[in-house]
Amino acid sequence: MSPETKPDYLISPEGLRVDGRRPDELRPVELKVGVLKQADGSASIRQGKTYIIAGVYGPRELHPRHLALNDKAYLRVVYRMATFSVPDRKKPAPSRREKEISMVIANALSPALFLEEFPRAVIDVFIQVIQADGGTRCASINAASLALADAGIPMRSLVPAVAVGKADGVIIVDLGDEEDKYGQGDVPIAILPPTDEITLLQQDGFFTRDELLEAIQMGIGSCKYLHELQKDALKRAYVRKTPDGEPVEEDEFEDDLETDLGEADMPEEDE
């Protein structure tokens, strides 16, 4: 289907979406940590056809210095779309939309960070959209959150995010490109587990009160699932491995501890 062609329907008579998903079904998600060796922390996300890389640098000295905050670090987020990320070539200069999304992402991530630990410093988050197919704002939050954790920035929690929308009167989760363009609206949402505090909630389009509540509940449920995927990605990146590259099981950790310590070094129990 051509990107400019509006589909005949977004929800089929069988209740399926244009890509065959159910209304409450996410696109396939692949998360990786440590993809950029020069960055202090990095992560990538593939969500459907959307592909995004995030890199974190800092905490480090802030330039220009007049932007420094006396009581906390300055979280500086730069969201950019590659010129080849969309069918119609994007202009290289930062757009107003990119600047707005940069601010939105920073606001969504800030509540999860202990920025007060690094006064007058800056934490830079650079986000590059390699391929856009809907949901780049929320996918960027998912990747940037992992990159911050990979950089060792103190965090209350990872921040999962997802967009919920409405198509042909049906509430759907994780909008693809056609649903984003031709649907009746969308509600990007991000939360801070385990309290489910909402750090991002926007609305575009018309929703009734019941539809909005349904969208928020569906979004929170999907965010919890994405949070588990984020944790799994971190575990895969930092799991202890054998010289052959195989992961070490938990009981093997205990065996190593006993072997390294040695019975002779164990304190004798008083009889």
Image (cartoon, rainbow, N blue to C red):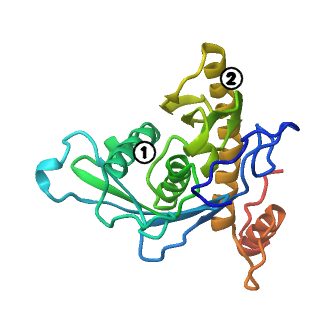
Q: Is residue 224 rendered to the left or right of residue 74?
A: right
Q: How far is disc 1 from disc 2 in space, using C-alphas?
A: 23 Å
Categorize mark 2 by other alpha carbons within 10 Å: few (<14), some (14-19), many (20+). some
Q: Is residue 111 rendered to the left or right of residue 188?
A: left
Image quadrant assignment for residue 61: bottom left
Between 194 and 173, the one lying in front of the other is 173
Query: Mark 1 against mark 2, which lies toward the viewer?
Result: 2
Comes first in the chain, label 1 or label 2: 1
Give the residue displayed 55% in from the left and 23% down from the top.
206
Please provide percent x and percent y for residue 223. 65, 39
Residue 217 vertical position relative to residue 174 in the rendered view, above or below? above
In the picture as drawn, the residue positioned furthest to the right comes out as 14
Residue bearing the label numbered 1: 105
Between 10 and 186, the one lying in front of the other is 10
Image quadrant assignment for residue 175: top right
Give the residue displayed 51% in from the left and 40% down from the top.
156
- Under circle 2, the secondary element is helix
Residue 61 vertical position relative to residue 169 in the rendered view, above or below? below
Residue type at mark 2 is Glu
Residue 16 vertical position relative to residue 124 in the rendered view, above or below? above
Give the residue displayed 28% in from the left and 54% down from the top.
122
- Under circle 1, the secondary element is helix
Residue bearing the label numbered 2: 214
In the picture as drawn, the residue positioned furthest to the top comes out as 209
